[in-house]
Image: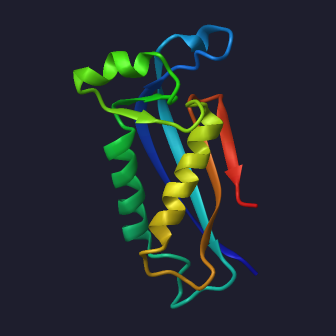
Amino acid sequence: MTHGVTVRHNFESGHRLPHLPGKCQSLHGHSWWAEVTAEAPALENGLVVEFGPFKRQLRRWIDEHLDHGLMLGPADPLLPVLAPYGMKIHQIPGWPTVENVAALIAQVAQDALTDLVRAAGARVTHVKISETHVNAATWTAP
């Protein structure tokens, strides 16, 4: 039997995908939702991971790095143009596609688990990132 917990958080962030044809080449923003699931093969002291600290660490990282900021790819020509203005810019490996944002949040959440009270074998198994009400991407642990 496997047990799981899920944490949700939302953030406002802009991005652009200049390497793809179409309207997403333009700088635009979304109201993003992150949904992160951690699972463990068995509960320890009745839990997979302590909810409070897990939520705080995940939400703190998202708020500090992504919320009311801009996500750009490291090769985006706007990066050196906008950086001198003191904007909150987070470089997403590759490009800031919803798929890459899901993978980034999965890594952030997994890193958060290492410092928390958790069951043996607890790990992040699923991340869903919604950039709109109708568009989402998932990351699932191998």
Residue 117 drawn at (x, y percent): 44, 81
- Look at the picture and state if 122 lies above or below 37: below
Q: Reply above or below: 62 against 19.
A: below
Q: Is residue 91 left or right of residue 42?
A: left
The answer to whether 87 is drawn above or below residue 60 in the figure is: above
Where residue 142 sits in the image (x, y, percent)?
76, 61
Q: How many marks?
A: 0
Q: For residue 70, what is the image quadrant?
A: top left
Residue 62 in picture, x, y percent from top left: 40, 47
Q: Is residue 35 above or below residue 121?
A: above
Identify the residue at horizontal 50%, vertical 21% (top origin).
Answer: 76
- State left or right for residue 54 relative to residue 43: left
Q: Position of residue 91 (x, y in %)?
A: 46, 35
Residue at x-position 50% and y-position 30%: 74
Quadrant for residue 137, please give it: top right
Image quarter of the N terminus: bottom right
Picture residue at 60% right of the left edge, 9% below the top: 23
In percent of the image, x 48 and y 74: which residue is there? 114
Q: Residue furthest bottom?
A: 45
How are the colours assigned in the image? rainbow
Q: Nearer the viewer, residue 118 or 115?
A: 115
